[in-house]
Amino acid sequence: MERSEVDFAVEQAAKEGWNPGLEDAAVFFETDPGGFFIALADKKPVGCISAVTYGDDFAFVGFFIVLEEFRRQGCGVQLGQAALEYLKTTHTIGVDGVLAQQKNYERSGFRFACSNIRYEYKIVVPVPFVQSMTIFSEVPSGLGEVLAYDRQCFPAARKVFLEKWLAMKSAKAWFWVEGGELKGYGVIRKCRTGYKIGPLFADSEVIARDLFLRLCSFAELPASVYLDIPASNPGGIRLAQTLGMQPVFKTARMYLGPEPEIQVQKIFGVTSFELG
């Protein structure tokens, strides 16, 4: 794809109910400009897929969409083949597949790891949050510490992505720093509908809760805030239930290749279903 064609992918994602962020297209494309593919019929876009690489060790497949009238005609197969060919030297490939497509991914060699559950938090009055001396709008020691902490929860270093993600005008980040050490951070961004928080990484459920509520203060009320929690982190599910959040959507996190070694207990919100 060219950059302008990524807008087609984001628009189709919106029509499928995936609720993309307002600045997702630009940030996603800049992370790996060669990793976006489009299917054309009579020079018109009819399908898309992304295959974004984070070095040679990890990649993530997303935006796998074919227009309904072109489905079951081999278009999806060709898109999938193009993505895997682009990623042929990658050690591990991840995907958050909709449940209806889980079997198709299995036929391509992907193996189920866990479910990611999207929870909705409805806000009608200002959210009370802890006025903590440990929560900062930026990390005093700089981006390097954020990258190091992020690497505990994500399968690869992603400097290019995080630089763009943290700089979005329609987003806000908060960081928990205690004793000079980063112990959690989160980002909230404005989406087509409401807001999404992702990532939300934290050393404990208490830190995750305080960060979540502080992030929610960014939302213009009334609002819905969405958080995508790995079912394999019971602390994250407990946090959602304690706050009265409701599950609205579920994906199957799957991997082709060795499952990454990451600290799932610190993942209270994945970054996105499109780029991992």
Image (cartoon, rainbow, N blue to C red):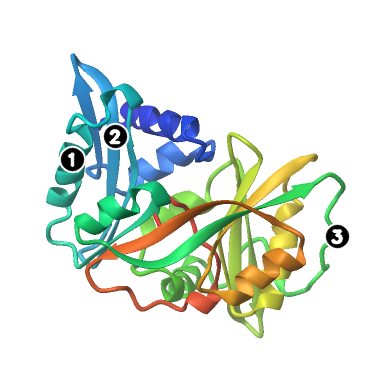
Taking depth in this image into account, of 183 and 128 the one nearest to the observer is: 128
Q: What element carries label 2?
A: strand
Label 1 sits on what residue type?
Val
User: Are the residues tagged 2 and 1 within 8 Å (C-beta)?
Assistant: no
Q: Callout 2: 10 Å neighbours few (<14), some, many (20+)?
A: many
Q: Report which residue position mark 3 lands on.
A: 128
Q: What element carries label 3?
A: loop
Disc nearer the start of the sequence (1/3): 1
- Which is more foreground, mark 2 or mark 3? 2
One can see residue 274 in this view? no
Residue at the location (73% across, 53% down)? 216
Disc nearer the start of the sequence (2/1): 2
Residue 214 shown left or right of residue 47 in the figure: right
Taking depth in this image into account, of 75 and 11 the one nearest to the observer is: 75
Residue at the location (32% across, 27% down)? 5
Residue 98 shown left or right of residue 49 in the figure: right
Label 3 sits on what residue type?
Pro
Q: How many marks?
A: 3
Q: Residue 48 carries which label?
A: 2
Taking depth in this image into account, of 85 and 74 the one nearest to the observer is: 74
- Which is more foreground, mark 1 or mark 3? 1
Q: Where's the C terminus, which quadrant? A: bottom left
Q: Report which residue position mark 1 lands on.
A: 77
Q: Is mark 1 on a helix, strand or loop?
A: helix
Instruction: State the separation of the CA atoms marked 2 and 3.
Output: 42 Å
